[in-house]
Image: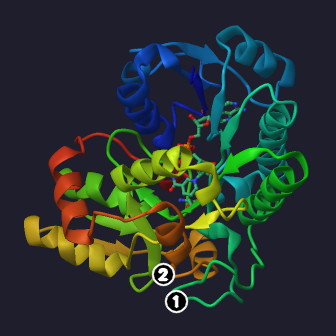
Amino acid sequence: MKKIMVIGASGQIGTELVIALREKFGNDNVIASDLKETIKAALSGGPYEQLDVMDNEALKAIVNKHSITEIYLLAALLSATAEKHPDFAWKLNMEGLFNVLNLAKEKVIKKVFWPSSIAVFGSNTPKYNTPQYTIMEPSTVYGISKLAGERWCEYYAKQYNVDVRSIRYPGLISYTSLPGGGTTDYAVDIFYSAKRNEKYTCFLSEQTALPMMYMEDAIRATIGLMEAPDDSIKIRSSYNLGGISFTPAEIYAEIKKTKPDFEIEYAPDFRQKIADSWPSSIDDVDARNDWGWNGEFNLEKLCKIMLENVLDAGISVSQNT
Ligand code: NAD
Ligand code: SER
């Protein structure tokens, strides 16, 4: 029987992933876990375990206790926060992955999902329609940890027959849970300012195009990849996933259609350099061909749903940094 554990469940992706997995596989078969002691209301419908993924013994004990078969490992420091804490970012992003991959190597668990990112690319990578296989010279601690993680995932798949699956997520946009310290967080924060009828100060310049995706598409892709037949998964490093590409000026223009008085100003900070090193758009033909990926949300649909659902309060971690 499938027993799933989501590590980093209280975060932006984890919250929605746990809800979706519980709807599909049943509340009791999906264990949410996070470093945080308190359970979010959205996760209270099923089991919760407080866990530091770097504590290997505690991880093993929880996996044994619940007879876990699959782990979705989401705990990490994201790009903007990682630049402020490079040593710790490397430690968390790599140690957590090794602890989980080793459980699969020892055949304690059967399957692993681990997310990579568009941050694996660098300024020498072709910027538009970035292919699956290309120059990869990330310049951020976060990107370096994700690229190293991809190589280790492929190594464990080839050497130890580990069933590990991965997606290079673009910037993710959602309203259920706030983003946790990334360079793409502006595309969430902007909706809170619009909702509060406040001028938005954008930390990226107006023409900075980045690949983005509405969370519902990302969750569908994640579960779709994990449920795809084993022999359809040809890439064991990480799959490119495209989504929608837009600039701050373009998302602002789309929001203004609903909020005509909304104002924006641009004050690029250290995150501009990170964004400038990333692709503007992604080619995801392998994900489409191998396991049938297809996105459903365009910019118009995304803005409509965000404006309808974000609450007046709330600002992401990175907007405060
Ligand atoms: P997030 O920061 O919102 O959530 C991460 C969660 O991990 C938090 O709830 C945090 O408490 C928890 N955590 C931190 N340290 C932990 C530890 N030692 N043990 C257990 N839990 C711990 O991040 P997210 O946006 O949900 O991202 C999840 C994953 O997806 C990360 O690997 C990230 O790199 C990747 N990703 C995210 C995006 C995005 O736009 N959100 C894009 C690309 C890749
Ligand atoms: N959204 C993530 C970040 O900005 C991309 O991996 O860090």
Instruction: Bin the neighbour count of mark 1 within 10 Å (Cα to Cα): few under 14, some 14-19, many 20 and up.
Output: some
Please state which of residues 122 and 100 is positioned toward the viewer in this rendering: 100
| In this rendering, position of residue 192 left or right of residue 30 | left
| In this rendering, position of residue 75 left or right of residue 137 | left
- Residue 177 visible? The answer is yes
Q: Which residue is mark 2?
A: 281
| Kind of residue sitting beneath label 2 | Ser
Please state which of residues 171 and 152 is positioned toward the viewer in this rendering: 152
Q: Is residue 185 above or below residue 113?
A: below
Please state which of residues 316 and 3 is positioned toward the viewer in this rendering: 3
Residue at the image position 69 percent from the left and 21 percent from the top = 51
Residue at the image position 50 percent from the left and 60 percent from the top = 291
SS type, badge 1: loop
The percent position of residue 83, horizontal first and vertical second, equals 72, 59
Question: Which residue is the extreme one toward the right?
Answer: 159
- Residue 260 visible? The answer is no
Tell which quarter ligand 1 is in: top right
Report the label total.
2
Q: Which residue is mark 1?
A: 128
Question: Spatial distance from mark 2 to mark 1, Cα to Cα?
Answer: 5 Å
Q: Quadrant of residue 277?
A: bottom right
